[in-house]
Amino acid sequence: MIKNLFYAGIALLIISIAIFLYVGSQQANIISQVAGKVTLYNFTVPADNYSHVQITLQNSAYLIALLKLSGKANVYLFNGSGYAAWHGDMAGTAPATGLSYAKSLEGSGTILIFNNVTIASTPETGTPALYNSINQTAFLPPGPYYFVVDNTNGSLSSGSTVAVNASYPQPLTNNVLSVISSKEGNLVYLGIAFFLTFVGGIILLIYGYTRKPEGEELPASYPGKSLKGKDDISKEYIDQLYKGIDRAKRERKRRRPE
């Protein structure tokens, strides 16, 4: 065993484990920066009525929200002016439904429309929106935004109460996303360092354990080692030399004339 290489391999493995633990803690820290500040809001929407969740953006931000409903109802996302216009229409005496009012405001206040769903979210997940004006890579401008659960005429659950579970993290501003992106970039390099130190440690560990230092006598049973030592070789050589001399004497006697 080459001890220096063997111990160097152990050291690299320890370093790789330390890097792995650090990356894991930093990843958890990034997640907690977003998911750790989630607002949960539970409410009910009576039959033939509507209610809303208001989210106010202080700066331009990427909006993430999820609404889970106990029954199928219409869900809309309005900006401030869109909600004021829709709410005014709903307070009037016109026979139109909340869904038709929301559609009439497309492009001028309505941002999202979900028709008879139990899950509504931004960005969209498994349930597609009937209407979506959000550019998935763009921020929404500052201001109030309203997620409306419409359980009036046109909703499949309009005859019963609908329970709603709303959750949304802090709006992701450009500053927050820049910090997260920077940290994620650093974690990529640390991940590469972990891989290299781990593989290097394994190689040195195996090589150092299986190899023999220069000049160290190998055991007799080691593959490729001769079973004869130096003394054995010298004795064999001398024996062959004497035998050669004896053969030469016998040959001269045989050739000597009678």
Image: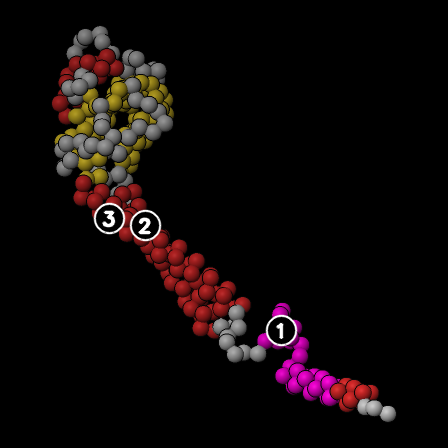
> Which mark's residue is nearer the viewer, 1 or 3?
1
N-terminal-most mark, 1 or 3: 3
Left or right: residue 86 compared with residue 207: left
Q: Is residue 23 above or below residue 245?
A: above
Left or right: residue 33 compared with residue 18: left
Q: Quadrant of residue 69?
A: top left
Between 222 and 242, the one lying in front of the other is 242
Per the model, the C-alpha gap separating discs 2 and 1 is: 48 Å
N-terminal-most mark, 2 or 1: 2
Per the model, the C-alpha gap separating discs 1 and 3 is: 58 Å
- Cβ atoms under marks 3 and 2 closer than 8 Å: no
Dot 2, crowdedness within 10 Å: few (<14), some or many (≥20)? few
Between 117 and 44, the one lying in front of the other is 117
- Cβ atoms under marks 1 and 3 closer than 8 Å: no
Give the percent coordinates (x, y) of residue 160.
Answer: 34, 18
Left or right: residue 38 compared with residue 145: right
**Residue type indicated by callout 1:** Lys
- Cβ atoms under marks 2 and 1 closer than 8 Å: no
Give the percent coordinates (x, y) of residue 196.
Answer: 39, 57
Residue 227 part of the magenta-drawn span? yes
N-terminal-most mark, 3 or 2: 3
Between 84 and 112, the one lying in front of the other is 112
**Residue of label 3:** 182
> Which mark's residue is nearer the viewer, 2 or 1?
1
The residue segment tinted magenta is: 218-246
Q: Which mark is residue 225?
A: 1
Could you tell me which secondary element the residue under label 1 belongs to? loop
Residue at figure coordinates x 49%, y 68% from the top left: 208
Quadrant in which the C terminus appears: bottom right
Residue 119 in sight: yes
Q: Which mark is residue 188?
A: 2
